[in-house]
Image: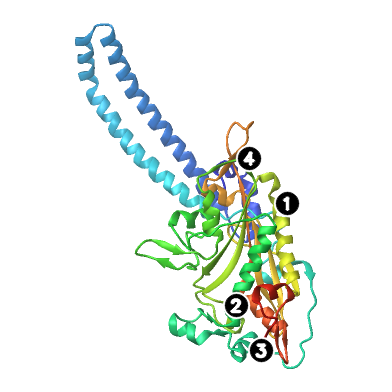
């Protein structure tokens, strides 16, 4: 979340920049400032009354020290009522202080992150800006089948069996379909390791503090699966547990950046999703993903973002997929992100672009929630880090595009880079 200090010092800038995200922050910002003024005034009143009690105690102590014990007892009796009233007033003020602080926190988390200055206004994904295109859209030899027909033809993914076991959106991968999944995961992890990322295997259930730290909670869109008995949440992305490794930490400046990668299954309720655009692998409730995360020095975070975008671009290039990179507009960028680049690959049979990755810089927005800071040798106090993450990559739509783009009358060709992982070069 935005820091209180920044909001106080940059009230008009916060309001104006959030308009790019189509968010009117006027009332919330004003409420934050008023609540903070009330909090400060209440704290001052508490301090003053505590000082009065301390003054009375000090005077009693001085009398005793001077040998006037009788006078001290008399003074204590005379001021007992006053002291009691002061303590009662302090209790009430502390109640008000706690309520005001809670209300202030509740308002602060309503504000989205400020968009980077390069983010353009817009209403939806149709207003996103294409910054680069790459790869070649192939001509398919023979009949062009969408992936939901290809997986039945070659019996590699079974949606009906997944529905039987769990429900819609939970496919079962079989035979070469399962091996292709495993191959992609291993390939993505190996490539991330070459880029300097340390692999971790985090839990796929997280607590409420972790969900809050990265901005998934409060869950405004009801996207997370909630295990209510233990109040735990199934992760929608490895971003959540991996970034929370650094919650409540003060890192050494010389140890930045921290670079982690993780493979996890991911879970999203996707309530209300329906239609042809979510058919087959296009939209699932459970899917596999390799995530890359960086904890960066604020001065270097946009260089880190460029490096992460280049890393993802390298992956889609090696898979031989036609792609485009989009800079998200204000109407499509997430609540927590300052700048996001989406990767889309072309689906030959569906003849449309499929999103396969988002790479984002959150600047200090998540770090403030996480209380993640860094401190250098010459720094008087610790400062907030910047956090970044990206899908590298999400598998379902990558698989859909690979199946559709590489289909031939003789079977589905496996990209050369994956053959050592799959131990086969064609699905037939």
Nearest the viewer among 244 and 62 is: 244
State the residue at coordinates (31%, 15%).
59
The C terminus sits in image quarter:
bottom right
Does 266 sit left or right of 326 as displayed?
left
Q: CA distance from mark 1 to mark 2?
A: 36 Å
Nearest the viewer among 94 and 217 is: 217
Question: Up-down: is 275 above or below 370?
Answer: below
Dot 4 falls on a residue whose secondary structure is helix
Q: Nearer the viewer, mark 3 or mark 1?
A: 3
Q: CA distance from mark 3 to mark 1?
A: 44 Å
Quadrant of residue 326 within the rendered picture = bottom right
Q: Which residue is mark 2?
A: 179
Q: Which residue is mark 4?
A: 253
Rendered location of residue 360, percent (x, y): 65, 58
Rendered location of residue 336, percent (x, y): 58, 57
Residue 303, numbered circle: 1
Rendered location of residue 99, percent (x, y): 39, 45
């Amino acid at each position: 979340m935005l820091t209180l200090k920044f909001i106080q010092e940059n009230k008009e800038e916060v309001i104006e920049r959030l308009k790019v995200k189509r968010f009117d922050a006027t009332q919330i910002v004003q409420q934050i400032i008023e609540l903070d003024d009330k909090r400060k005034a209440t704290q001052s009143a508490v301090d003053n009354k505590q000082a009065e009690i301390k003054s009375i105690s000090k005077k009693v102590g001085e009398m005793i020290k001077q040998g006037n014990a009788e006078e001290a007892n008399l003074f204590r009796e005379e001021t007992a009522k006053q002291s009691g009233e002061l303590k009662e007033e302090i209790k009430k003020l502390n109640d008000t202080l706690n309520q005001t602080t809670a209300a202030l926190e509740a308002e602060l988390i309503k504000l989205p992150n400020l968009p980077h200055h390069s983010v353009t206004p817009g209403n939806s994904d149709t207003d996103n800006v294409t910054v680069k295109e790459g790869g070649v859209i192939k001509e398919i030899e023979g009949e062009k089948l969408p992936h939901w027909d290809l997986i039945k033809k070659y019996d590699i993914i079974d949606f009906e069996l997944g529905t039987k076991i769990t429900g819609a959106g939970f496919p079962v991968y079989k035979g070469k379909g399962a091996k292709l999944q495993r191959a992609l995961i291993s390939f993505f992890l190996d490539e991330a390791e070459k880029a300097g990322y340390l692999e971790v295997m985090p839990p796929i259930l997280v607590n409420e503090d972790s969900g809050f730290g990265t901005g998934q909670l409060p869950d405004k869109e009801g996207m997370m699966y909630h295990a209510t008995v233990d109040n735990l949440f199934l992760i929608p992305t490895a971003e959540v547990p991996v970034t929370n490794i650094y919650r409540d930490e003060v890192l050494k400046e010389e140890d930045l950046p921290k670079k982690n990668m993780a493979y996890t299954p991911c879970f999203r309720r996707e309530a209300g999703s329906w239609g042809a655009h979510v058919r087959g692998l296009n939209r699932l409730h459970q899917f596999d993903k390799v995530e890359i995360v960086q904890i960066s020095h604020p001065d270097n975070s946009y260089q880190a973002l460029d490096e992460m975008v280049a890393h993802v671009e390298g992956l889609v290039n090696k898979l031989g997929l036609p792609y485009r990179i989009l800079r998200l507009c204000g109407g499509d960028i997430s609540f927590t992100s300052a700048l996001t680049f989406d990767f889309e690959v072309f689906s030959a049979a569906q003849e449309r672009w499929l999103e396969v990755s988002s790479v984002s810089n959150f600047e200090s927005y998540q770090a403030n929630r996480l209380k993640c800071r860094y401190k250098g040798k010459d720094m008087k106090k610790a400062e907030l880090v910047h956090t970044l993450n990206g899908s590298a990559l999400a598998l379902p739509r990558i698989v859909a595009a690979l199946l559709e783009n590489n289909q031939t009358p003789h079977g589905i060709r496996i990209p050369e880079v994956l053959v050592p992982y799959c131990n086969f070069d064609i699905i037939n």
